[in-house]
Structure formats: structure tokens, C-alpha cells
Image: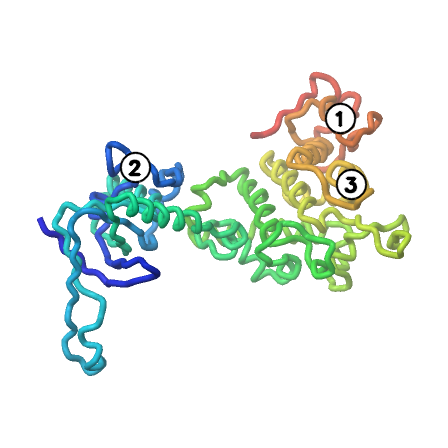
């Protein structure tokens, strides 16, 4: 049975192609994944990307639940069907020049019914359409734009189509994480992070809104900032996971936009945390009052608060760990642990900022995440978690380590077998932590992390 498809005829390079619109139901029924076309797998020679589990976990729920769903055009190859394009002549109209009335490339693309379509670009979209329609048949009536190219069933035709498939998939580059933070309208963390940078007068001047690195560099251009947009997002993800005693942040949480009331609540929660941290952190008052830049406190000071210079007269890096993303990550993890364990927000931040040195050249930071000899951040996620455990233990929070094991891990890390952990801190959220370090070494004082 003949099949007529309304289409625009176009050309790019040596490819002639057609642009049309199809019902999702038709696409689902008639368009195939490349490996499904022949039982003998001739078209397996196409090097395809795997159909990943994100089709089920992300894309199908998107089609089923998002009223503003939209997909870009599928690029499909067609073979068989004896396609024939018939241009439609344009009737007279005052806006159309007489010379152009018969030259428009739109009309009907006719197939004899034996054609087979397969996806060159958009296989994840095709698979998600097929699976979403199986769950909600009403989606079959919606439409998607489709770009159709003719595939020749010859060796040369296969090579030509395979090359195009490879080009489309190799050149398809996902947006960077920085770009996702800047434009995502479903991810709550991205939305609230942008809003904090845009609306809060204190925070907006401290976050470098570049879409590149997470790190703050020693470059003078970075002096006004304590973090980058990507690092700010990561810190907010840590903090927000402690919202109302614990919030599960997974792919689904980031994929579906919550209500405006929920977004406002997340915003207020994070804004309060950031302002408390900045106001309580040693050395930040001059920054908040505009008398200093964060770059000024990322330098080593002596006991009298005077800059320490090297033999060339250049300031030596050091200073505040909280003026760097790495310090914010660690402090955020400790705050998260405290809030999940029911500790008051204000008391937790006060206890950390008052009792834990924020000088990166002092313990617990030095030689764990900071190399003072070369003045560089070092270490991995493992070192970050070691610091979280050391600080959390001093606050009396439940952690996964036996104290003797934590102490040995710390000593091995800094290569000092006489080093001690931070002393226990007496604060209103830590009424039960009155033991000494030697008492904490007993088997009876094993703390377990709140998962």
C-alpha cells in the first residue's frame, strides 16, 4: 500500500534529504534500531552507541511526565520503498515572485509500502518513544520532525551510510557540566544555585560564573572569588542532601522540576547556610565589608597577621581553606552529617568555625589536602572523607571509623606516627562527647556513620 509523506526536499554536500513530520506511533512502529533491520546482522557494521539504561531511568519518565516534553529531529535512513518525490506547485500569491512559483522544494514523498527506516541519529530517543508509547498509547498521536536520507543496498551505499552514522554520533557532543548548571530548568540544584548567584548580594560577588574548571587558581583574576559555579553547585548538592533530615538526590531528583514552593524552600535553606558560614568563618568579615578580596586571605600569614613572603618578595600561598572550594566541600559534608543526625544548624556552624582552624597550613588540613612545600592542593576523595571524619569525630558525630583506626589513617597520611586527632569539642550539639582520646580508643566507642 502506497504511503505518502509530506516533505521538504533539501541538499547539503552530496546528500539529498527530506524533512518531514511523523506521528510518534508511526515512528515507533516503522523506524528501527540499526541492528534490528536484518536477521543476518549485515548492518551491525554500523558502530553504534549502546542504548544505555538512561532510556528507562530518564528519557521514558520524561516523555510520560513532562508536559513541556520536546525532542529534536530524528535522522533516519530509508531503504526500499521505491521513494518518489512529487513537488507541489504553489498557487498564485502576491508575496511570491512569478519566477519562483514552481521552484519550492516541498511536496509529497511517496513510498510503495515496502520501505524500512532505521535511526542514524536519535537511537536513544527512538527507544524511549517506543517504550513510552507502550505505557501510554496516547503519546502515539504526538509528532516529531524526521530527516530522511535514502540508503542504497550496495557495498558503496553501506560504506556511505556507515560513514554518516559515525560522523553524526562522533560529532554529537553532550553539553558540559558547567553549561548544564547554567541552563537546566529541571535540576533543582542548578536552579537554586543560579538563583543564589543572581539574587543574593553577598554570594553573587563570591562565585566565579565561568563554565570551566571547578578550581580557584592563584591568578589575580580569581582574587574576588571563593568558588566557581561548578564547585558551588557541588557544595550545594552536599548541603541540600541534608534538607529536613535527609533528601535523596539522584537522577530522578535532578530530572524533574519540583513546585515553586519547594524551590523556594531549597533556596531559603541554602541561603541561610551560606550566610551563616560566611559570617562565622574567621577572616571573612573584611571580605563581606568590601575591605579585602578572598585572594588576600588565600595567602600565608604569621602569628601577627602579616603576610609571609618568599625570598623573591612574593606572598606564599596558604591562608583560609574556606576561601577555596576544597574547604567548602569538606565543611559542607560535616554540616550535612550533623544536620542528618539532628544537630541544630546554627550551633553546628558556630562549633565548626569557632573550634576548627580554617588555616590550611594547620591541622587537620596540612599534608592531607595541602602540600605546604609546593603550595598546592593535593589528595583525592579519600583525603576529603578523612578530613570529614576527623572533624566530625571532634564534634561528637557518629562516623564509620573506630578511633584508633582513624588516628592511624591520619598518621599514615601525613607520615607522622606521633600525630593526634583534633580534641573533642564541647558544644551544645555535643553533650555526650566528654571522653578523652585515650578513652575513645576503646572498642566500646565505635561510632557508625549515619547512612
Q: In the depicted view, which residue is nearer to us: 29 or 333? A: 29
Extreme top residue here? 443
Helix or strand or loop: what does disc 3 sit on? strand
On the image, the x and y values in percent for residue 378 come to 72, 40
Identify the residue at horizontal 48%, vertical 57% (top origin).
Answer: 183
**Label 3, on which residue?**
371
Real-space Cα separation, disc 1 to disc 2, in angstroms: 56 Å
Q: Are marks 1 and 3 in contact (CB under 8 Å)?
A: no
Identify the residue at horizontal 71%, vertical 48% (top origin).
Answer: 322
Helix or strand or loop: what does disc 2 sit on? helix
Badge 3, how many Cα within 10 Å: few under 14, some, many 20+? some
Residue 407, labelled with which disc? 1
**Label 2, on which residue?**
35
**Mark in the foreground, 3 or 2:** 2
**Mark in the foreground, 1 or 2:** 2
Real-space Cα separation, disc 3 to disc 2, in angstroms: 53 Å
Amino acid at each position: 500500500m502506497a504511503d505518502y509523506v509530506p516533505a521538504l526536499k533539501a541538499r547539503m554536500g552530496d546528500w539529498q534529504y527530506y524533512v518531514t513530520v511523523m506521528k510518534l506511533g508511526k515512528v515507533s512502529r516503522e523506524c528501527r534500531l540499526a541492528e534490528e533491520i536484518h536477521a543476518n546482522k549485515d548492518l551491525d557494521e554500523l558502530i553504534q552507541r549502546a542504548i544505555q539504561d538512561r532510556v528507562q531511568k530518564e528519557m521514558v519518565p520524561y516523555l510520560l511526565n513532562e508536559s513541556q516534553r520536546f525532542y529534536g529531529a530524528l535522522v533516519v535512513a530509508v531503504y526500499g520503498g521505491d521513494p518518489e518525490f512529487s513537488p507541489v506547485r504553489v498557487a498564485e500569491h502576491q508575496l511570491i515572485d512569478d519566477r519562483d512559483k514552481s521552484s519550492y522544494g516541498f511536496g509529497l514523498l511517496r513510498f510503495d509500502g515496502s520501505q524500512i527506516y532505521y535511526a542514524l541519529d536519535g537511537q536513544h530517543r527512538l527507544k524511549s518513544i517506543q517504550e513510552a508509547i507502550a505505557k501510554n498509547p496516547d503519546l502515539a498521536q504526538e509528532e516529531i520532525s524526521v530527516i530522511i536520507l535514502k540508503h542504497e543496498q550496495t557495498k558503496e551505499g553501506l560504506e556511505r551510510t556507515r560513514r554518516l552514522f559515525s560522523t553524526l554520533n562522533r560529532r554529537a557532543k553532550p553539553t558540559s557540566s558547567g553549561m548544564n548548571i547554567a541552563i537546566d530548568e529541571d535540576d533543582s540544584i542548578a536552579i537554586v544555585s543560579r538563583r543564589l548567584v543572581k539574587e543574593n548580594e553577598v554570594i553573587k560577588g563570591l562565585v566565579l560564573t565561568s563554565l570551566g574548571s571547578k578550581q580557584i587558581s592563584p591568578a589575580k583574576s580569581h582574587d574576588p572569588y571563593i568558588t566557581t559555579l561548578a564547585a558551588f553547585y557541588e557544595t550545594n548538592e552536599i548541603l541540600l542532601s541534608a534538607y529536613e533530615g535527609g533528601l535523596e538526590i539522584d537522577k530522578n531528583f535532578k530530572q524533574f522540576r519540583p513546585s515553586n514552593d519547594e524551590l523556594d524552600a531549597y533556596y531559603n535553606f541554602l541561603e541561610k547556610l551560606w550566610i551563616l558560614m560566611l559570617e562565622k568563618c574567621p577572616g571573612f568579615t573584611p571580605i563581606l565589608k568590601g575591605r579585602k578580596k578572598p585572594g588576600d586571605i588565600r595567602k600565608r600569614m604569621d602569628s601577627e597577621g602579616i603576610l609571609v613572603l618568599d625570598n623573591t618578595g612574593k606572598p606564599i600561598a596558604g591562608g583560609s581553606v574556606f576561601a577555596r572550594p576544597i574547604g567548602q566541600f569538606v565543611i559542607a559534608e560535616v554540616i550535612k552529617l550533623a544536620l542528618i543526625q539532628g544537630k541544630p544548624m546554627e550551633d553546628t556552624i558556630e562549633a565548626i568555625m569557632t573550634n576548627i582552624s580554617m588555616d590550611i597550613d594547620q591541622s587537620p588540613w596540612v599534608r592531607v589536602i595541602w602540600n605546604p612545600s609546593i603550595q598546592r592542593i593535593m589528595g583525592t576523595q579519600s583525603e576529603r572523607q578523612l578530613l570529614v571524619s576527623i572533624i566530625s569525630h571532634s564534634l561528637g558525630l557518629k562516623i564509620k571509623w573506630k578511633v584508633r583506626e582513624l588516628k592511624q589513617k591520619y598518621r599514615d597520611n601525613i607520615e607522622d606516627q606521633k600525630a593526634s586527632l583534633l580534641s573533642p569539642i564541647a558544644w551544645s550539639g555535643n553533650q555526650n562527647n566528654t571522653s578523652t582520646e585515650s578513652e575513645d580508643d576503646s572498642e566500646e566507642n565505635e561510632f557508625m556513620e549515619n547512612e
